[in-house]
Amino acid sequence: MAAPLSDTPLSPLRTVAVVGLGTMGTGIAEVLATAGRDVVGIDISEAQAVRAVAALESSTARAVARGRLTEDERAEALARLRTATDLRAAADADLVIEVAPESYEVKQRIFRELDGIVRPDTVLATGTNALSVTRLAADSARPERVLGMHFFNPAPAMRLVEVVSSVLTSPAAVTAVTNLALDLGKEPVAVGDRPGFVADGLLFGYLNQAAAMYESHYATREDIDAAMRLGCGLPMGPLALLDLIGVDTARTVLEAMYAASHDRLHAPAPILRQLSEAGLTGRKAGRGFYTYEAPGSATVVPDAVSPRETEVVVRGRTVRTVGVAGSGTMASGIAEVFAKAGYEVVLAARSAEKARAAKDRIGASLARSVARGRLSDEAAAGTLARITPAGSYDDFAEVDLAVEAVAEDLEVKRQLFATLDKVCRPGAVLATTTSSLPVVACARATSRPGDVIGMHFFNPAPAMKLVEVVRTVLTEDEAHATVREVCATLRKHPVDCGDRAGFIVNALLFPYLNNAVKMVQEHYASMDDIDTAMKLGGGYPMGPFELLDVVGLDVSLAIEKVLHREFRDPGLAPAPLLEHLVAAGCLGRKSGRGFREHARR
């Protein structure tokens, strides 16, 4: 008995038609042609087809100039591409990749026409990242041959391809497209059919929250973007990325995600509608969250909301001596940062022994910097000499700035601030490094709440450039100015934010991590595929599960509980899988097991 058509192995996909020659379609055509495939580029606009060929000629010329292609390889690639304005040009294609506008009506019309043109064994792929592949497949005469093939922009540079199968897709079609992606030098990730798939499903929720954060005037667009670049190592900030993607595109994707999930985190922030309807759709329009030199330009120009280099109205207080309270990794790192910048540092802990151990840790860190050629022996010795270990906070009597870096426990911090209030001289600024607790609660434990502020360093403090400067409603301008000026001398980048849970970075980062856990919990995708998708598709330095194991699952859970308690949003409730792992003692690298197994240190 003959095998069903849907199970019959498909021949290699040698001839590929690309329908829609915008930026993405042109990029996909380039990837295919340079990898030896015969490509038919189809667009209803002849002018657009001409522009696509010109773009391909320019792109391949740059590749030759950079040594990525030879002249002969370029000529062969260009010869493999032909363009047309009629879908009938796809008649001999083994695979058709549709990258038309994100509209069911447009895409369904294309698929219906292709049904009467291509061979029975031709695979039809949609490049959508927002619409239902299943719905498109069900409307086709060959649903078993329809799947999603989601490239990322720019297609020649981005390695990730999400291969999206519906309940109707044949295994043979999935295998054929997966093998093609591998032949193209891409990293295929198999995902199911739901709006956003893996990478965009996680990315767009985060982008939406960033847009809402900006809309609420919680922080400036520049500070939000700088915080996520410097605090998380991302290649772009979320608002700049929204401008690159297109505000209208982001709104469309989020609408589709919300229709499927009914999660408030996916309900498009009103500002996305306002910008879209005003035609301020990002770089392509010359204006979105930022203003650009010209439509299509990447060069940001000043506008009405750009920070102004104006005369400073309030000057900070003089800071020469700094007290650092704590003996852990963060306290040691912060003390090292201040001492390197020339400040005299008193490093105080609950005992003289703990304080000396913390100074020894700093000495080891400085020795590593010397060994790597980043610091001279003299500079390291001078830095260490400026640090005085102390077993009592009484030694903070003459410091100009006290920085608390003790356990993330509100009662512990309140008790410490009550002590600092008694021992520190009048006028000293008192700062907490909390990442999630209310700064004002620390301030209210003192008789001088105007001198209390958040100064949230990131770990490891000597390497990370970001400091979130957190004002409460009671913080005085002079205390705020002092911390901003100190950050400048430390060569750190300060971002201003208000006193609410998570500040900027954690308020955007941890819901994204929580949503990744939910994906695994729902058996939508594997941890490995999710990590791969976010590194290759989103440019993240680490995948969410790698990062969770590094941060610590207990720490992550605590932060997510704080966010959920503050904002009362059901979408922020910690994923049960995360709670189960923490209850089981699986805390990440530090315990030897988290989402993955780790060698104990």
Image (spheres, helix red, strand yellow):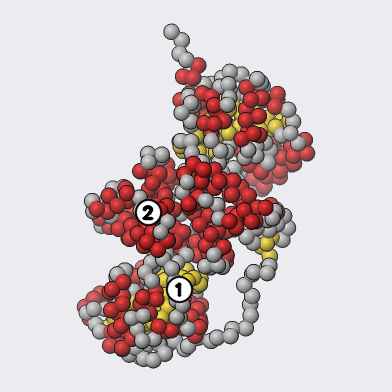
Point out which mark residue 40 bears.
none
Which residue is nearer to you in this view: 403 or 104?
Answer: 104
Q: CA distance from mark 1 to mark 2?
A: 25 Å
Q: Residue 151: percent from the left, percent from the top?
A: 56, 40
Q: Earlier in the sequence, mark 1 or mark 2?
A: 1
Give coordinates of residue 391: x percent, y percent.
24, 82
Disc 1 is placed on an element classified as strand
Q: Do we see residue 24 in this rendering?
A: yes
Residue 551 visible, this angle: no
Image point (57%, 30%), residue name: 136
Q: Is residue 451 left or right of residue 585?
A: right
Give the quadrant of the N terminus: top left
Say left or right for 26 vs 436: right
The amino acid marked with disc number 1 is Val
The image quarter in which residue 18 lies: top right
Task: Locate the C terminus by quadrant.
Answer: bottom left
How many badges with numbers are in the image? 2
Q: Which residue is mark 2?
A: 573
Instruction: Tell me, yes or no, whether the two marked residues, 1 and 2, touch with CB atoms within 8 Å.
Output: no
> Which residue is at 74% across, 39% downward?
48
Percent position of residue 403, x then y: 37, 79
Left or right: residue 478 versus residue 112 is left
Residue of label 1: 470
Please tell me which residue is depicted at 32% across the width and 55% down the height of the picture: 553
